[in-house]
Amino acid sequence: MTKIKLYTVAVLSLSGVLLYGQETPSLITNEGLFSVSPEGVVSIEGNFENTASGHVTNDGMVIYFHDFINDGAYGITTKGTTSTTVFTVEGNPQRAKQIAGNQLASFYNIIFDSPVSKVAFDLKNNIDAAGLVDFQNGIVVVDSTYNPITKVSHGMFTFKKGATAQHMGDASHVEGAIEKIGNEIFVYPIGDQERYRPARISASKEVGDVFLGQYVYNDAAFFNARQNTVGVINSINDTEYWIVDKGTNEQSDVLLTLTWDESTTSAAVLTNPEEELHIVRWDAKQQIWVDEGGVVDMSTKEVTTIGTVKGYGFFTLGTVKKDWILDGDIVIYNLVTADGDGKNDYFIIDNIKNYPNKVEIFNRWGARVYETTDYDPKGDGSTNVFRGYSEGKVTVDKGSKLPSGTYYYVITYEYKDANGSRMIKKAANLHLETN
């Protein structure tokens, strides 16, 4: 008969745990209290069900070898950091492991480990993680269909503030939507059709901001319905896209990084990525793809820019027409030596005063250190310019002198000519010397 193995019996508390039947695997049902202290290790070798009357608190380690169903209270001690939950398998399984239920299950550290291909873990439960999620092996597929009992989707994977992920790859990631709470740098462990294609965000303004991330591959119908582009865009990566969703209609800017991969990214946008590749966004209001700019890192195959997210944001990669980039004779000097010698003492952007503009500067961790509109209105550096101090509306250590190093700027301005008005975004590295 399948049973619960108690490795450290003294620190485990059980009440109302029932084992049914002689089949393999057996059903293990919790109808009362089930708690594991920080030193406890428990392995459950049957299908586990936490019923509506059940209450589980895991501050140690619990290993689930078969299906997990939660309809009761399931979590960790408040502010606890000792909990680890392992979803794994035994033998040579042929089907996906079910993680299901109608009540939220809260975890700290989670380990996913299963050799089943395509769908190793079928997530039909809303779960959250506050610590480290280790994708050792196996793809987690989120069931986003509507659950009439909970009035939300059957499945959702939420990373709480401070939570991170590791060991992602083509055989170990999440397919479907992931929520991220918090304003720290986060790499979404996402992919589709056994292809790992992450997105990275940072520099969200609010600690409690929630952003949803998802990757979709080979969705021709999506691009067939979204073909219009602004004039500066030359071609669109029409084989893949990312969703970054704010979840509300409040606008928020994030530092967004996407990658390219020759196995998934349209060849049409990879002819000259270093010079032409940008991030583009589908503007639902205008029904058009717009240029979001981008700094290309050839060594990591990454493109980074500021992405404006309001409600659903659909992003992909695209190429831009190089001869349109310098409209308005804007000239940017990417060196600031804030030493008072009269040379490069501030961030010089020639002719920016002639256009409505916004200037943002970020450090290498993606934290916004400077933000302003109407930059250098007199064109002589006397007012409203960046001099190596965090002076913007949303800053890190406002008013303090920033350390020397490489920063990242994003300049957005409105340009008008005989063809009409358009927004132009420039993004690149800024070198700051304050010693």
Image: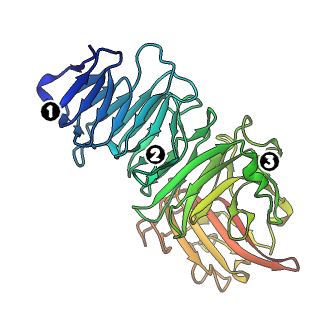
The residue to which callout 3 is attached is 269
Categorize mark 3 by other alpha carbons within 10 Å: few (<14), some (14-19), many (20+): many
Give amino acid for label 2: His
Question: In the rendered image, which residue does mark 2 sit on?
Answer: 154
In the picture shown, does residue 178 fall above or below 48? below
Residue 115's disc is none
Question: How far from the left and from the top, in percent, is residue 420?
Answer: 83, 78
**Left or right relative to 198: residue 9:** left
Residue type for callout 1: Ser
Query: As displayed, is residue 261 above or below residue 328?
Result: above
Find numbered disc 2 in the image and state the secondary structure of the residue it sits on: loop
Towards the viewer: 34 or 331: 34
Left/right placement of residue 400 relative to residue 310 reads: left
Task: Name the residue at 42% across, 69% down.
Answer: 400
Residue at horizontal 62%, vertical 40%? 197
N-term mark: 1 or 2: 1
The quadrant holding residue 41 is top left
Residue 358 % position (x, y): 62, 74
Q: Residue at x 63, y 50 (%)?
A: 242
Please report contact status of discs 3 and 1: CB closer than 8 Å, yes or no: no
Marker disc for residue 15: 1
Count of numbered circles on the image: 3
- CA gap, disc 1 and disc 2: 28 Å
Q: Earlier in the sequence, mark 3 or mark 2?
A: 2
